[in-house]
């Protein structure tokens, strides 16, 4: 840890980038940078977790609170599929009014009427379901998978150090619990992504500790398909709007050290959604081999007034201009050949 922290803290930016690029090239020697076409569907914004960094959620009985109907979710899926989407990312707030059966029936409804890969329900949501419905977390994961859940996102990871979580997300799954649920998911045969949101009061050493904990779990389970990191978007947040946005240099240093530390996680995703297209493009030379999602719909980051948008043509141009071959992918990072995009 000390060597990684020293390199992260003191190495020149380009030296960090070169080392991260070397790791990327070792893992992905063909020079392909992938992206996915999908849609984020936030099924409810009602939440009792009260995270200080979230501008999206609304407390119960708030006038702006909502829960989407199955039909509304189905219509969003159909719209996304018409635009070439191959998956949906489905996450929501910790809504105490929704019964567990609603989630299971939703998954079955989607698979029956609007079949698509469902990437959904982060460890924080699984932990909430476990507590709210008095179920073992493994049973929650199994029931969601049996109902149609295909893979799980790394949402709610923030910084996997309890001191930091106690400051900003005290009501959500703690660091150990978050990792425990990820390990359960991997043991049950589910692949997941893993994330880090930084700039929320952690030290550089705590960022490295987060990476080390991810690496340790991956060495046991090999269940993480990709790592994604991004900085806090502070605007409109309940208690962190005073925090300055971290800059592009901090982002590039952080994504580079993540690629170096997590050489056992196969894919690293660029976060153009929070950093903008040009920084997202530069990140492809700082260890990233994936340009993320077209983001047909995105609600959480945009609630903090960060609203970058793009097209598949622009994504492919930026990837090509960075010296790589663009390719559409599925959630498991398999490549979609052009004549099967609509399939």
Image (cartoon, helix red, strand yellow):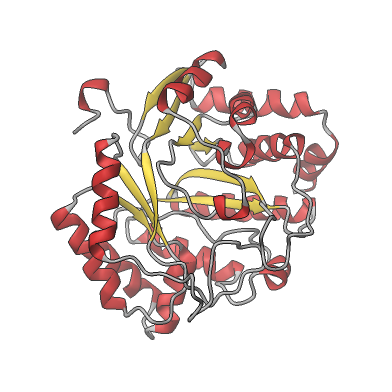
Residue 122: percent from left, percent from top: 45, 61
Task: Determine the residue positioned at 39% across, 35% down.
Answer: 36
Task: Determine the residue positioned at 35% across, 32% down.
Answer: 329
Residue 165 to residue 259: above or below: below
Furthest-front residue in view? Answer: 63
- Left or right, 118 with respect to 124, comes to left
Residue 184: percent from left, percent from top: 41, 65
Determine if residue 39 is in view. Answer: yes
Determine if residue 323 is in view. Answer: no
Q: Nearer the viewer, residue 27 or 255?
A: 255
- Left or right, 179 with respect to 131, comes to right
Furthest-right residue in view? Answer: 10
Task: Determine the residue positioned at 55% across, 44% down.
Answer: 228
Task: Determine the residue positioned at 42% across, 21% down.
Answer: 313
Residue 191: percent from left, percent from top: 38, 51
Residue 316 to residue 181: above or below: above
The answer to which image quadrant residue 334 occupies is top left
Residue 129: percent from left, percent from top: 40, 76
Q: Nearer the viewer, residue 235 or 105?
A: 235
Furthest-left residue in view? Answer: 112
Q: What is the total number of numbered labels drawn onto the structure image?
A: 0
Considering the image in quadrants, where does the C terminus appear?
A: top left
């Amino acid at each position: 840890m000390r060597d990684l922290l020293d390199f992260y803290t003191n190495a020149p930016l380009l030296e960090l980038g070169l080392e991260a690029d070397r790791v990327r090239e070792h893992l992905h020697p063909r020079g392909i940078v992938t992206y996915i076409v999908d849609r984020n569907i936030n099924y409810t914004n009602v939440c009792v977790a009260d995270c200080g960094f979230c501008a999206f959620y609304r407390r119960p009985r708030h006038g702006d609170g909502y829960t989407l109907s199955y039909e509304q979710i189905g219509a969003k899926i159909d719209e996304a599929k018409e635009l070439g989407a191959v998956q949906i990312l489905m996450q929501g707030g910790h809504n105490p009014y929704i019964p567990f059966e609603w989630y299971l029936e939703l998954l079955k409804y989607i698979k029956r009427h609007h079949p698509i890969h469902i990437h959904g329900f982060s460890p924080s949501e699984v932990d909430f379901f476990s507590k709210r419905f008095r179920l073992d977390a493994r049973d929650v994961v199994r029931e969601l998978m049996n109902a149609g859940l295909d893979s799980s996102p790394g949402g709610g990871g923030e910084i996997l150090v309890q001191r930091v979580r106690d400051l900003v997300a005290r009501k959500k799954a703690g660091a150990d619990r978050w990792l425990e649920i990820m390990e359960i998911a991997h043991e049950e045969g589910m692949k997941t992504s893993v994330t880090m949101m930084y700039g929320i009061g952690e030290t550089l050493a705590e960022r490295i500790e987060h990476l080390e904990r991810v690496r340790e779990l991956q060495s046991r389970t090999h269940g993480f398909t990709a790592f994604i990191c991004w900085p806090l978007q502070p605007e409109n947040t309940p208690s962190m709007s005073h925090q300055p946005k971290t800059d592009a240099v901090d982002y590039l240093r952080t994504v580079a050290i993540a690629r170096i530390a997590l050489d056992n996680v196969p894919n690293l995703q660029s976060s153009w959604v929070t950093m903008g297209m040009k920084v997202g493009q530069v990140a492809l030379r700082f260890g990233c081999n994936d340009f993320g999602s077209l983001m047909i719909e995105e609600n959480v980051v945009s609630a903090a007034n960060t609203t970058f948008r793009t097209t598949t043509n622009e994504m492919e141009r930026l990837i090509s201009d960075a010296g790589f071959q663009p390719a559409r992918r599925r959630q498991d990072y398999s490549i979609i050949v052009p004549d099967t995009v609509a399939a």
